[in-house]
Image (cartoon, rainbow, N blue to C red):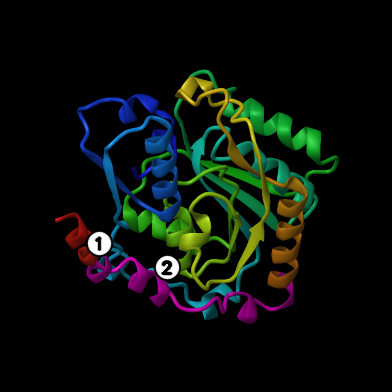
Amino acid sequence: FPSHDILQWNWMFQDKMFDGFIASSDYVMSAITSKLQIFNSDQTYIKIYPVMYKEDFPNARIDIEEKKNESKFTVLYMGQYTKRKGMEDAITAFAHALGDKEDCQLVLKYHRLSKLEFSEEEMIKRTVAMNCKDFKAQIFEVTDNLNRQQIIELYKSSSVVLHPSRGEGFGFVIVESGIVGIPIIYADNSSCQEVVGDNMRWRVPFYQDTPVGMTQYNYPSDGTYGVPFMSSMIDSLKGSYSAWKNSRDSYYNVGSEDFIFEKFSEKVVIEQIKKLI
């Protein structure tokens, strides 16, 4: 279970095809436990984290001296164009918090999963118009498939990562931002707190609610996901922008990526796999 979405597939817990499951986080493991109890299943489970190799992230860490010369405060959203991932929430918060700032920009790196979603161009235009009277910032879209190095460069060119996801099975965006050294604003739900590390971040509280917009992806109508509070997201964007304006040096001094490579090391994962054997 690398993804939060798959947990909605109840048939997997009623089908004898599977002897057990591998969870990518404590959050997913807890969700699996609940499913097994509901369906009175004798399937087993174990948690195994994805492995993070330093070799897969060559020259990933930002150069603080270079970042001091930034002229634009760049907010990066990375994820699907779905209600769960929160792309519209990201645009709304950005327009409210920083839309009137000429030195701010939002980069949307996304892909769409369904033809049922509204046109991205129309949604972006409408959301901005409804949430900022005098929009002076810029919004850029990146929809190309990128290789690992290109993704790293996209992170490095950003000033903060905005991650308003309403549910994560693991949280790769959080992990990658920590490896690169970019501060992050994240919704503190599902598995996010497990992987956030010691990098500078703004925690956005959330409330549980019906997973609107997700029926097309087989989410049950009686399920829930963690919706981040918009006011907290807006305040976090304002706070990160203010800190960036005040001192680039202290702003980008976000701690070490060693936490990530230690917690998700090959050694740790091997010990987890031994339990399965």
Which residue is under mark 2?
Answer: 179
Q: Nearer the viewer, residue 268 or 239?
A: 268
**In magenta stretch: residue 106:** no
Q: Residue at x 63, y 30 (%)?
A: 210
Q: Which residue is mark 1?
A: 272
SS for callout 2: helix
Q: Which residues are magenta?
A: 245-269
Q: Which element is circle 1 on? A: helix
What residue sits 33% from the left and 30% below the top? 13
Q: Residue at x 39, y 49 (%)?
A: 29
Residue 4 at x, y = what percent? 44, 40
User: Disc 2 residue type?
Assistant: Ile
Q: Main secondary structure of the magenta part?
A: helix
Q: Amino acid at mark 1?
A: Gln
Which image quadrant is residue 21 in?
Answer: top left
Question: Sequence-wise, which precedes: disc 1 or disc 2?
Answer: 2
**Distance Cα–Cα, label 1 vs label 2:** 23 Å
Q: Is 257 inside the magenta-drawn segment?
A: yes
